[in-house]
Image (cartoon, rainbow, N blue to C red):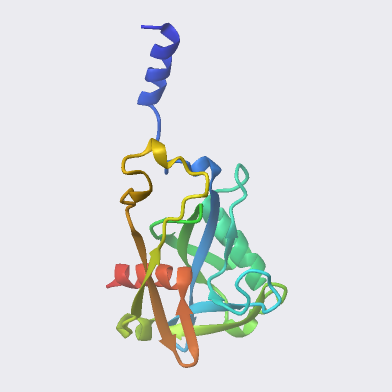
Amino acid sequence: MNADLTARFEKLKNHTPHVLGSKTLSTYAVLLPLIKMDNEIQILFEIRAHHLRRQPGEICFPGGRIEKGVENSETAAIREASEELQIEKESINIIGPLDFLVQPYETIIYPYVGWIEKELSAISPNKSEVDKLFTVPLSYLLEAEPKVYTVQFKVQPEENFPYHLIPDGKNYNWRRRSMDEYFYFYEDKVIWGLTARILHEFIEYLK
């Protein structure tokens, strides 16, 4: 066998698997923040600033893009929460990670759960990103059953797609894909989307 190929096969033995294509995907880190209020554990949520281009006014957790080659996902989750909540990094105590999520639009999300070691009244979020904060008692969410709706994804090849190269051509039986969307309701707040999926993962883990 070619010596170069042999060396490459040996290299493969020591390869650590990652998500296929992850080198070109955008990666983000998110913090699910816990805070103690009145001797009760609460989950802290943000309402995004209304002037933002993406998802203005929506409910979310602190988070943002991971600076590749500069920081890992945990460090990014702490940095983003520190910047958005305008608190010291030392006030954020990571408990551990949840399962990471590969999104259909070429992103990977790395969620973490952590304590905010600060009084809510002492937190003044960055108004360029956050309109306001609110909390929901963990005890309430442990009892709440989210409403679940299914989103169907439609396959739509581009106009010059080479149908003649695949079995059955234009009649090819594409595999359908669907995704569950969770909705949690608290007072006048609706928590849904990626935030609700991460929240659901956390709640199910605790149960």
Is residue 40 at all visible to an observer of this figure?
no
Q: Where is residue 36 in the image (x, y as percent from the top left)?
A: 47, 81
Q: Residue at horizontal 52%, vertical 63%?
A: 30
Is residue 153 at all visible to an observer of this figure?
yes
Given residues 60 and 55, the one toward you in this image is: 55
Question: In the current view of this chain or complex, which residue is farthest to the bottom?
Answer: 187
Position of the C terminus by quadrant: bottom left
Q: Where is residue 8 in the image (x, y as percent from the top left)?
A: 42, 18
Residue 32 vs residue 13: left or right? right
Q: Residue at horizontal 41%, vertical 22%?
A: 11
Above or below, comparing residue 4 to residue 97 in the picture: above
Q: Position of residue 111 (x, y in %)?
A: 46, 61
Q: Residue at horizontal 47%, vertical 41%?
A: 21
Given residues 207 and 55, the one toward you in this image is: 55
Q: Residue at horizontal 57%, vertical 68%?
A: 62
Q: Position of residue 98 (x, y in %)?
A: 40, 60
Q: How many labels does the image show?
A: 0
Position of the N terminus by quadrant: top left
Above or below, comparing residue 186 to residue 105 in the picture: below
Question: In the current view of this chain or complex, which residue is farthest to the left?
Answer: 207
Given residues 43 and 19, the one toward you in this image is: 19
Above or below, comparing residue 62 to residue 9 in the picture: below
Above or below, comparing residue 105 to residue 189 in the picture: above
